[in-house]
Amino acid sequence: MAMEYEPIKPYADDLEDSVYTQEKHFSIDIDIIGNAEKIQDDDESKNLNQLAFRISDPNIANKGEESPFIPASNSTNLPLHGQQPPQHRLISLDVFRGLTVVLMILVDDVGGILPAINHSPWNGLTLADYVMPFFLFIVGVSLGLTYKRVSCRVTATRKAILRALKLLILGIFLQGGFFHGLNNLTYGMDIQQMRLMGILQRIAIAYLVAALCEIWLKGDDHVTSQLALLRKYQFQLLAASVLTVIYIFLLYGLYVPTWQYQIPDATSSSAPKTFSVKCGVRGDTGPACNVVGMIDRKILGIQHLYRKPVFERTKQCSINSPDYGPLPSDAPAWCQAPFEPEGLLSSVMAMVTCLVGLHYGHIIVHFKDHADRIRLWLIPSSAFLVLGLALDIFGMHINKALYTFSYMCVTAGAAGFLLAGIYLLVDIYGYQRMTLVLEWMGKHALVIYILAACNLIPIVIQGFYWKQPPNNILSLIGIGR
């Protein structure tokens, strides 16, 4: 990312980790998955060393000052027990982030060819369904490392809010409809039809909630055991529990009435067609009558929702299911209705995923032994996986579109196992050369997301053509036809 940040000034050494210098107060610039890349201090520490961070500098990861509050290891001969990791950037987190970016690009580009790895049409779990929760999980881990200490909570809160707003605005610009996609060289956004939610918007909301919890909801206990860790962050655990209860109560308790929507008639200039979706139920988690969609229609407005939802690939709505295709002759009325996959209620459980990642970050901060970290990661990860799969068997289906509690559990557990595995290979045993590309991608995740996942590069290339817009390089190689 070609952005340069102002110098920072660390202050007195930490009592627990004398080799660390801690910031007087924080200012965090996050990328798509919440990597903290900037720490600022006030004028009281002018006599101490100044650190400058540049996100686009790939060599900065090897400098001990790049992120002094993140303990990690680069040694290839470190035992699991009895030795504390050297104290510099946690490479495995960058690799995990880069791996998630690769997964995102893969499912975006290949998912249309191989529907089996594309997002599940409704219930179920595919490779693509891991991308969003992995991003959110890494946001939480990064925040746990970044907000190790906060000297001024009000200032930290203000800066967290500003950064969340920046990410929210960027998301609306990229996914709100300003760019009209391939095969369309026009641009511009009808505010009355603008999509309000999206990937970056959801990450911004989850980041803000997790940051506020980390700033305000942690105790002063000295952590020497797992029980002490839970006691120190008990109010954050309570917040995650309350959010989960609210989500489940609303999802299964609210009444969903019959509703209508309109779509333009493509064959004529007459009035739009009106479709009526009969509901009148509670606790329905199907595509037509779920509470997640109802809340988005009521609060955001149906004209501001995503217009190509995944349930268009279900058997009821596509003759080519699990791929997109023509409607069957007996397709139900809801098949062409807008639906927001990053909606308001489903984002509540996204916040919980971020808070789960925050707990894994706390383990890095408070436990220095490799074996302790891996053990404390694998225990909750196993519990999440077992709980999520059990809930799915007993009727609370794994569903990415609704971001169900079972989906949160399974994906958070998988993220925990993956973090532990990457940490073991990269930060303990030092297999870093084979992951250099992933590490670089992890440090530039936002730029890669904007250029690749949002199709900005193809759109720019498509703008250069010979005589007629269809005569461009993309069409020549078969992209965008």
Image (tube, helix red, strand yellow):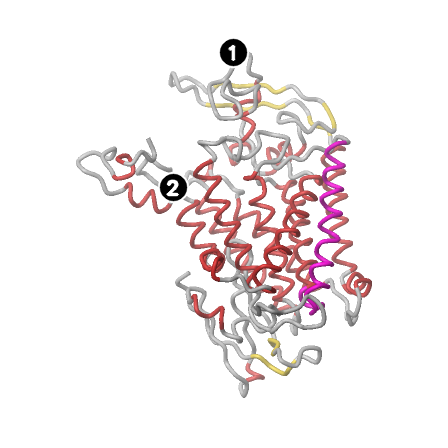
From this view, report whether residue 444 is shown above or below residue 5: above
* Range drawn in magenta: 364-393
From this view, report whether residue 42 is shown above or below residue 369: below
Q: Residues within 10 Å of mark 1 (few under 14, many from 20)?
A: few
Quadrant in which residue 57 is drawn: bottom left
- Would you say residue 32 sits in the magenta stretch? no
User: Where does label 2 land, which residue?
Assistant: 179
Question: Where does the image place residue 242, in percent across and percent down from the top left?
Answer: 76, 48
- Would you say residue 385 sits in the magenta stretch? yes
Write the residue at 76% across / 37% down: 390
Is 363 displayed left or right of 23 in the figure?
right
Residue at the extreme front: 77
- Which amino acid, mark 2? Phe
Residue at the extreme bottom: 47
Write the residue at 59% across / 19% down: 276
If the image is split into quadrants, where does the N terminus sit? bottom left
